[in-house]
Image (tube, coloured by chain):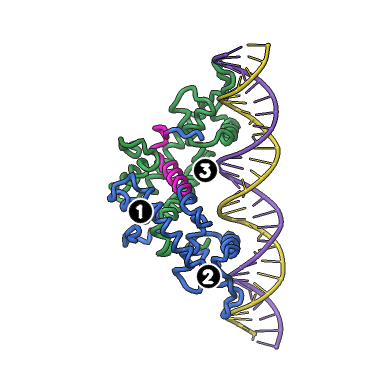
Chain colours: A green, B blue, C yellow, D purple
Amino acid sequence: MTRDAPPEVLRSRLGYLLKHAYLRLTEESSLALAPYGIDGRELAVLAVLDAHDELSQLDAAGKLGVDRTTMVSLVDALEDKELVERRRSPRDRRKNIVQLTPAGQERLQEAESARKEMERRFLAPLSSTDATGLVRTLQSLVGAPSGAGQAPDST
Amino acid sequence: MTRDAPPEVLRSRLGYLLKHAYLRLTEESSLALAPYGIDGRELAVLAVLDAHDELSQLDAAGKLGVDRTTMVSLVDALEDKELVERRRSPRDRRKNIVQLTPAGQERLQEAESARKEMERRFLAPLSSTDATGLVRTLQSLVGAPSGAGQAPDST
DNA sequence: TCTGACAGTCAGCGTTACTGACGATCCGCT
DNA sequence: AGCGGATCGTCAGTAACGCTGACTGTCAGA
């Protein structure tokens, strides 16, 4: 790989910085999660399903910020691995309620530990002030629900 | 678009935050640059070519962190728009020296103004302390040439 | 019951970036 | 001078990702 140090002209461009920070994190993430047979997106799906009850595919897609057609293949993959189950909602039979299986619960816990450890390593070059500041700042840019800073991940 | 507010479980995940910050910036960027007929990546190419003399395609690809095969289509597109020119290096006839045309110079200046304005808007929800902190922090994560903080873009 | 809206699925497309192969060129060595 | 390995640009093919549009089944209101 032709991995030059980023030249002066690019080091001040937000697009370049965000893109490459994201790419590096993604790479670390897939390495860290490989032993668990899932990637970062799938882990996020598991986490969202675990945190909310009775989520339909569309609800989950909304929370994750992905398209509903993308959600189909995401759930397909997780169902193949027997980490989630689809079941028809009795209330509204158009909806697929997606639920973690016991194996999914377990895998979620293990992989979440690995993710947290990975993020800790990723942020290691920063002072702890800078690290929490980064997370807080990104939250206000992305979530932007105007206020209420949130600690990174105290676990 | 199903644009929910990011749920609690995701707001502390670095991957989610970086990805969505990047996506939002990309969207703003293409809007801001649309009048100039280029996108953010092409603008970065122009900026790199402007900042260094006699860059070959491979040199430029190295600075930008893209593959040399990607560089081909990037230069193709810019050459179609008559913003850059390929010319064979007399020293090493394997190399294509890529240079800005006068039109390319001009377009670069205009588009750079638009980009800076766009970034200013994008960071507007942050205090100026947080904004410069974000840039500085991302620089140490990405460039990580161990030290020497750099101001965002004083222009 | 009819009509419009909604949930899930699938096929197809465009983007992005890669791998692998190829021709042209360069350079070190004999 | 000429040979062989490396380098640069190019192109075809491929994979991941996410979208649009169409289709089926289901729901809810007139």
State the residue position of label 2. B101
Asked if both marks, 2 and 1, belong to the same chain, the answer given is: yes
Q: Chain of mark 2?
A: B
Pick whichever, A29 or B78, lies toward us. B78
Mark 2 surroundings: few (<14), some (14-19) or many (≥20) residues within 10 A: some
Tags 2 and 1 touching, CB below 8 Å: no
Note whether A52 is above or below B89 in the view shown: above
Quarter of the rendering occupied by the C terminus of chain A = top left
Left or right of A129 on screen, residue A92:
right
Number of the front mark, 3 or 2? 2
Q: Could you tell me residue A120's position as x and y percent?
A: 37, 45
Measuring from the top left, give residue C9's x and y in whole percent.
Answer: 64, 30
Residue A34's disc number: 3
**Which residue carries the number 1 mark?**
B135
Looking at the rendered structure, the kind of residue marked 3 is Ala
Look at discs 1 and 3 and give the one toward the viewer. Answer: 1
Label at residue A105: none
The kind of secondary structure element at disc 1 is: helix
Segment tinted magenta in the rendering = B5-27
Q: Nearer the viewer, residue A114 or B11?
A: B11
Q: What's the chain of the residue with tag 1? A: B
Q: Position of residue D5 (x, y in %)?
A: 63, 72
- Whether residue A65 is in magenta: the answer is no
Q: Secondary structure at mark 2?
A: loop
Chain containing the residue with disc 3: A
Cα distance, mark 1 to mark 3?
Answer: 31 Å
